[in-house]
Amino acid sequence: MATRHTFAALSLFLAIFIHNSYAAYNSTALAVAPPGLPFTNDLAYLFFKHGAAIGAESLNGTLRAYDDTKCLRDIDRISNALGEYYEWAIEFPDTWGRLPVGLMWGHALSFGAYEECIAASWEFSTDDTLRGQYCLARVPIKKYMDAIIPRESTVQARISYKYTKPETFELGICIPSSCSAELGNTILTGVMNRYYDTNISTTMVSERYCKYEETVKLRAIDIFAIVFFSFIVCCLLASSVYDYIKTKNKEPKKPLFVAFSVLTNAPKIFTVKKTNNPNVISCLNGLRCFSMMWVVFGHGYMTFYELPHINRDKFYTWVETPYSMLVQNATLCVDTFFFMSGLLMLWGAFREMERTKGKLNIGMMYFHRYIRLTPVVAVVILYIMSLYKYSGHGPMWMKIGTQDERCSDTWWATLLYVQNYVFPKKICISQSWYLAVDTQLYVLSPLFLIPLWKWGKKALAPIILIGVLCMGCTFATFMKWKFTLFRVDDDHVDDRQRLTYYPTHTRVPTWLIGVIFGYFLYTKNRGRQIPLAKIWVISGWVVAFGVMLADLWGPYWRILPENPSAPIIEGAFYEPLSRASWAVAIGWIVWACYNGHGGIINDFLSWGFFTGFSRLTYCMYVIHRIVQLVNGGRIQTDTHFGDYEMVLRWWHDFGVALTLSIFATLSFESPILGIEKAIFGRGESKPAPKKIEPTSAPAEVAVAVEPTIGETAKNEVTKA
């Protein structure tokens, strides 16, 4: 009996989409379909047949005067033209989605042909043109999916309990542009309930998910954005021409006039100037670049997961692979950034305090920080709130191309760098939470800098205590909210992000570890290398790599289905300890490389290529997520979930983001540095002691790379 009911339910569901010859509607649907087409979309033909047959009175007063009357007239025109087999009319049902391949693997959508629908049109007269309107309908299928008897399986994925059968089927439909979403929903509901014996009462077609081709009407903010970006281009051209003429004539240049010059700024990015400068920790360039690549990689998977995969349910087994840990624990790269931020903040501040004999101009310090970070962020916000909406279109754009809506109310919090606390669930420029945390830590930094400068090691004890207390706060939050070891296994992901990922106090320990390493490097190590026995060097590298591997892959065995789930307390310990231990391991890499114990690793991380690349990382960090969302939102066909496909997409996103970051650096970041220097005259600090090689070190000195442009604002060495 159960089998019979299941079969009946499935047959009913499939009948909606599969092209069949049931007598119940054979005479109505197929009567208007062209002969000899076995793949005719019956639901689409029924929509136009039903819409043309019903009268205004049958809609129970739901017509909106002229507009809805015009809609019914256009549907009637299409229905009649279908009977005559006109190509322009056949395009409407031809663009509707069908039952897709892979429904049992979670592929519960069929976009149809978006561009064909938008382009469909027929001109009856000069002022009477029938045009297509694409809508993404959400058809309820829960009762049909619930009737399916699942296969018996002896192997269950660790997160299989989170799997739920699709409750709605996203179906692309094409209706006249004269139709409102409300009337389209009324007709579609009528067809479903009449011909398929359903009882649908939910809204399937909504205005938000409908789109037709219309004349672009620029808003005031759009016009402002176009004028602004055009002005910047003109500044680049004018400044570059001025620079070229003055250089050719060997005449002096005014600093403000060459602030936007590509001829001046481009070499500062791409030219590697070799010098033996102890104020430069050159291995940080490689660490910064690899961390940035990891950020793009991890965020790429976030966007990749949202795409219309034909094998969507493969995700539930993919998370059990060792490779997936590179994504699940990709957040560790953020801790690398926080470590470097703390280290370089102290290094730059101590250089300034050394020059000014212990004085720290806190006001100028904050101003310099804000003016370095904000221009690029402000420009990206302007783009999102203006021209972003014109960057893509299609079914996926309706689903994920909504960054402008997130920014409409929260842009001010992003510019004030408080979005991680004020709007943690609606952050404009989602990855900018890091900038907020880093800026807040920068604001608090004098509380640590001044005691360290005055009292030295005596100030370390309270600083370490603060870090331990913050780690305890993360531990307590995990225990209270019962957060699990893995984010993918957590039922409270949003709360987890809000309470343990975005808050500044949860990031203090990693940042303070960077501050402490920076203190010892600057006070005990600057200008000289500390010799270390080979056995201790090898031991240090083994321990550092072992810790990093443990942080990255240590929890892997817990996600395998044959192993017991991790207790809550295990995740509570792992979260703060993994971040702190990762930072300590990064600290060893920096210390060893700076002291000549890095060998080939230091040579690689200090490679000149990374120097130029690292100068683009700030702009890339701010821009890359928008690139990924635009690329993902423009997809209009089915995709395939797989690591190979993701790597290809990563290279594409990375290349586009890198190109745009070059333009952003030359247009906004570098000019601001030039203008600031011209106005405030931020000069170079007095040279530090030359780096002295230890007697046990090789005679050859590893050259450092002197940055010729200010380091990225995210983790900069502030020049005095």
Image (cartoon, grey):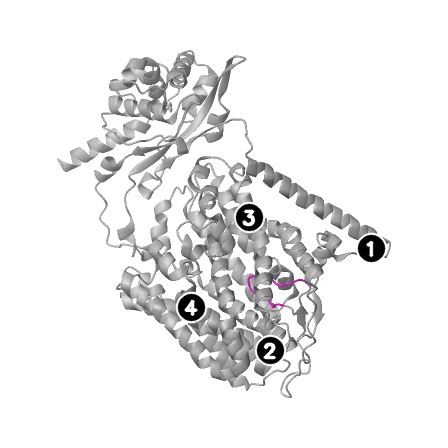
Which residue position holds label 4?
579
Pick the front one: 484 or 518? 518
Q: CA distance from mark 1 to mark 2?
A: 41 Å
Which residue position holds label 3?
380
Q: Nearer the viewer, mark 2 or mark 4?
A: 2
Residue 713 lies in the magenta stretch? yes
Quarter of the figure that contains the C terminus: bottom right
Q: Which residue lies most toward the bottom here? A: 695
The crowding category of the residue bearing disc 4, from other C-alpha atoms within 10 Å (few below 14, some 14 to 19, many at least 20), is many
Q: Secondary structure at mark 3?
A: helix
Q: Nearer the viewer, mark 4 or mark 3?
A: 3
Tell me which numbered mark, 1 or 3, is placed earlier along the sequence.
1
Could one spot residue 317 in this view of the protein? yes
Which residue position holds label 1?
247
Relative image position of residue 180 (x, y in whole percent): 39, 24
Point 38% across, 22% down: residue: 40
Q: Which residue lies most toward the left here? A: 1
Residue 55 lies in the magenta stretch? no
- Label placed on residue 358: 2
Q: Nearer the viewer, mark 3 or mark 2?
A: 2
Tell me which numbered mark, 1 or 4, is placed earlier along the sequence.
1
The crowding category of the residue bearing disc 1, from other C-alpha atoms within 10 Å (few below 14, some 14 to 19, many at least 20), is few
Tell me the kind of residue under disc 4. Answer: Arg
Q: Nearer the viewer, mark 1 or mark 2?
A: 2
Q: Is residue 456 above or below residue 472?
A: below
Tell me the kind of residue under disc 2. Answer: Gly
Q: CA distance from mark 2 to mark 4?
A: 32 Å
Tell me which numbered mark, 4 or 3, is placed earlier along the sequence.
3
Q: Is residue 512 above or below residue 247?
A: below
Tell me the kind of residue under disc 1. Answer: Thr
